[in-house]
Image (spheres, rainbow, N blue to C red):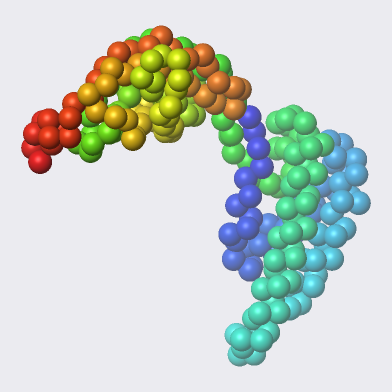
Amino acid sequence: MIERIKWSFKRLSDQKLIEFTRALIVSFLNNDYFPEGSEKVKSVEDALDVFSESIPSPKQRNVDNTRVKNDYKSQLIYEISRLALYAEYKADFNVKALQSVNFELHNKKQPKGLVGVVDKIILKTTGNAGEIIAQCASDPNASYYHARVSLDEQNWQFTGTNSNRNVKVASIPPGERLYVQMRLENTLGLGPWSNSTIGMIGMPEVIANIHGR
């Protein structure tokens, strides 16, 4: 797991945001992990001052001054966001550096490993004419599952993709011998196509009878 800054400050109430920002500014001053921190927080300090002064009292609050206040709040959040990006870049995944400032942290999942190879494919009908579900075992590293169907194992005319192991492929002619292959994908790339599984879709009236239609 990788420690990253959690941008929960965007959802803070006015007073909580002021308290958070004050503590954030102090945490960057004379911080050895962030030697430029004292300079970087100046724009945050300025935005905080303007926002704090723009908050109307309950008796003075109206649509216009509330809108102005919200605009200044958005500007403050923008400046804090810039500071968060600077902190993550400068820390370069140094957990102690990130923990030295007043940002809330959370664990972000590391990139997934390489996807595996599909070993076995199970074919199912959906009840709709010309449709099949190609199913394989789940792979914890897979983000996407791809299926392709051919009538001659050379021209792959029919394809489908899903984020889980059940991939629908449509517009397949009934009564034809089918060759079905699957492969997996994530941010690291695509896996190889599997060996073919052979199947056939029945005629529409047969499918309807199987599914009780």
- Please state if 6 lies on the left or on the right of 23 as rendered: left
In the rendering, at what x and y percent does residue 63 appear? 61, 86
Query: Could you tell me which residue is drawn at 17 percent across and 34 percent down?
Result: 204
* 121 w.r.t. 210: above or below: above
**197 relative position to 74: left or right:** left
Would you identify the image quadrant in which residue 72 lies?
bottom right
Residue 172: percent from the left, percent from the top? 32, 30
The reply to whether residue 36 is in sight is yes
- Counting the numbered discs, the total is 0
Quarter residue 161 falls in: top left
Foreground residue, 86 or 144?
144
Q: Residue at x 62, y 45 (%)?
A: 6
Q: Position of residue 106 (x, y in %)?
A: 59, 38
Can the viewer see residue 211 in this picture? no
Taking the spot 68% from the left edge, 46% from the top edge, the residue there is 103
Report the front residue among 96 and 148. 148
| Apparent side of residue 156 relative to residue 87 in the rendered image (left or right) | left
Q: Position of residue 91 (x, y in %)?
A: 78, 34
- Position of 204 relative to 59 (above/below): above
Picture residue at 68% right of the left edge, 57% below the top: 20
Can you say which quadrant of the picture contains the N terminus?
A: top right
Indicate whether 98 appears above or below 185. below
Can you say which quadrant of the picture contains the C terminus? Answer: top left
Residue toward you, 25 or 12:
12
Residue 91 as seen in the image, left or right of residue 108: right
